[in-house]
Image: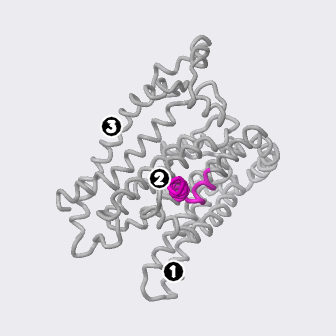
Amino acid sequence: MENTIITTAAAAAAIPMWQALSLTCILTWIFAASSLNLTQRIRSMVQPWVARRVAADVPLILRIQRLNHGLLDNLFSALSCVVSVSFYTGFLPLLFWSGHCRLGRQMTILMAFCDYVGNSIKDLVSAPRPSCPPVRRITYTKDEKENSLEYGLPSSHALNTVCLSGYMLHYILSCTRESNSTVFTVAFAIVVSLVLLTGLARIYLGMHSLIDVLAGVVIGLSILGFWLVVHGHIDDFIVSGQNVTSFWASLSLLLLFAYPKPEFPTPSFEYHAAFDGVAFGIISGVQQTYLQFHNEAVPRIFSEQMPLPVFIGRVIVGIPAILVVKFCSKALSKWMLPVVCNTLGIPIRSSCYLPALKVSDDDKKKSDCKQSGYLQKMFSFISPQESYDVDTGIRFLQYAGLAWSVVDLVPSLFSYLRL
């Protein structure tokens, strides 16, 4: 009897209450949203109002675009690239390799949080961007062309700029040993100027209306305020918590199902799946190698242990290594996931990665639906579909492998090469 009680208590202690509660809340939302059609109801209430506001902002956009000049086109296009998720994603490995590991962890999770909230609201509301014409839409880069395929509200650039630049300001000031009002004033002015320029750039480029930018700023400030309260607890959990990898894997899976279905397909969900994988790869890698490579005692750039040439050597070695891992993890996922899904009886399709799975005639759908298994029934209960897009899993694992290599494989190479 005593052994039974001890075993039960140990099992209960193995899963902290807050983890169970978090996953239960997300699962409850998935069931409620599916059974009560909450996405459609919320969209029907919010979308018409936002669409009217976007249309009302068109004269303001046209007035701003009267400043039409090639210099402004290039300046605002470059600014949009600098504050984009792609830029920050490329910046993250440099934070880890330069010794600022805590900042790298925090920025990764914050970016994943911003990306999920912003894109979820975009696809939930499914509000249009400013109509083109009469608005002139400037999309010089591939990223901007893909961004233009997403819905409008909120502006992801404005949201991310508020959160990430605001958190960078907090980190820099927290690292300053002596409080200096002048430093704070200058840094705060730079952050505010960057946010204002980013908002103006999105309107000038015809990518967003004023309501989109304002919504991005307000949501960004809300996320930033929340993050400044919880970021220390989250970091403590990542480096020394219980069930870190298993909890984050469960969280990542449920968030994929909890993502709202847009009115029409957009790239937003693909971006989330990729960055969801980045966050999982970083967290699982750091949790395993924290004491070796990511603790507060590791050398930082410009120190005696890591002069600038050593850091440059790390970049030269690290960038090709993570690109190779990304390619290999994608190839492995494309081979492994269909095999696993077929073995478990989960019907799948592919939108781009696997041409053989793009064919979906009626006979194939019927044969897929005849497959049965406990896992298939569970997925159907969570999100009833005829089949599931295996590209989501491939994308997740591809970027998870890339992120894992940033914090685990590549630091091991640095240690071997004495970099």
Q: For the residue carrying disc 2, how many other residues have a C-alpha within 10 Å: few (<14), some (14-19), or many (20+)?
A: many
Circle 1 residue: 186
Circle 3 residue: 328
Secondary structure of the residue carrying numbered label 2: helix
Where is residue 200 drawn, in percent x and y? 62, 60
Q: Which quarter shows the N terminus?
A: bottom right
List the single residue furthest toward the top: 363
First of labels 1, 3 by sequence position: 1
Q: How is the image coloured?
A: one colour
Q: For the residue carrying disc 3, how many other residues have a C-alpha within 10 Å: few (<14), some (14-19), or many (20+)?
A: some
Mark 2 is on which residue type? Ala
Where is residue 370 drawn, in percent x and y? 60, 17
- In the image: residue 352, left or right of residue 66: left
Circle 2 residue: 279
Q: State the CA–CA distance, disc 1 to disc 3.
A: 45 Å
Q: Is residue 99 above or below residue 121?
A: below
Residue found 59% across the figure and 26% down from its top: 387
Mark 3 is on which residue type? Cys
Q: State the CA–CA distance, disc 2 to disc 3.
A: 19 Å
First of labels 1, 2 by sequence position: 1
Secondary structure of the residue carrying numbered label 3: helix
CB-based contact (under 8 Å), mark 1 and mark 2? no
Mark 1 is on which residue type? Val
The overriding secondary structure of the stretch rendered in magenta is helix
Q: For the residue carrying disc 1, how many other residues have a C-alpha within 10 Å: few (<14), some (14-19), or many (20+)?
A: few
| Numbered range of the magenta stretch | 1-23
| Residue 73 appears in the figure | no
Depth check: give the residue in front, 136 or 52.
Answer: 52
First of labels 2, 3 by sequence position: 2
Residue found 53% across the figure and 47% down from its top: 250
Q: Which quarter shows the C terminus?
A: bottom left
